[in-house]
Image (cartoon, helix red, strand yellow):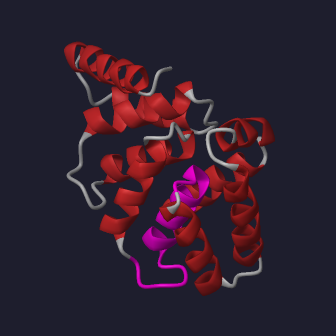
Amino acid sequence: MKTLLLLAAFAASLSAPVSVLALDSLTPAPGKEAYDKALQSYSCVDYEKALRMFKANAEAGHGLSQYMTGIMLEQGQGTEADVSAAYNWYMRAAKQGLSDAYFALGDMYSRGISVGKDALQAYVWFDLADRGGHKLARDMKQSQAAHLQPAQLETAQAMSNEWLAKLGR
């Protein structure tokens, strides 16, 4: 199920070039070229090479590469699975406003992967992903809302607003 959600999220990001282009405008052009080359290796199932390329680009600050590094580490593609490291890469991508990273963090909190299971935190991340146009986030957000009291929902929405304010959005 987790793999299907991440693959669907990844596919959704590929099918929405407008949001990808908008995100790439936050990083320098060389990051996009390196990302595209890494994505080609990933598409050819050369995971070790793709991970090396994504990670180098991620360390240079490219948000989509940070997200893909997280996916590959979480799934153990090209390396041993390391969900704690994946969480850190998702968080770095989230700090750049990447809705796929928000979704991945929401998923981690909803299932208690590498972090404690936390419906409020899951709701916050899914809400941010939903606001960013992520296609699967709304349903996941509603699922988490069913576990929260009205006051908790208000807190979660305030937390989402605070996050976006920090990003200047």
78 to the left or right of 121? right
Determine which quarter of the picture holds residue 35: bottom right
Numbered range of the magenta stretch: 61-81
Residue 54, image x and y in percent? 59, 69
2 vs 13, nearest the viewer: 13
Residue 64, image x and y in percent? 60, 53
> Which secondary structure is most common in the magenta stretch?
helix
140 to the left or right of 166? right
Q: Is residue 62 magenta?
A: yes
Residue 114 in view of the camera = yes
- Vertical arrangement, residue 97 with respect to residue 32, above or below: above
Residue 27, image x and y in percent? 62, 46
**Which residue is at 45% across, 72% downward?**
73
71 vs 35, nearest the viewer: 35
57 to the left or right of 113? right
Residue 100, image x and y in percent? 55, 46
- Vertical arrangement, residue 145 with respect to residue 150, above or below: below
**Which residue is at 22% across, 20% downward?**
152
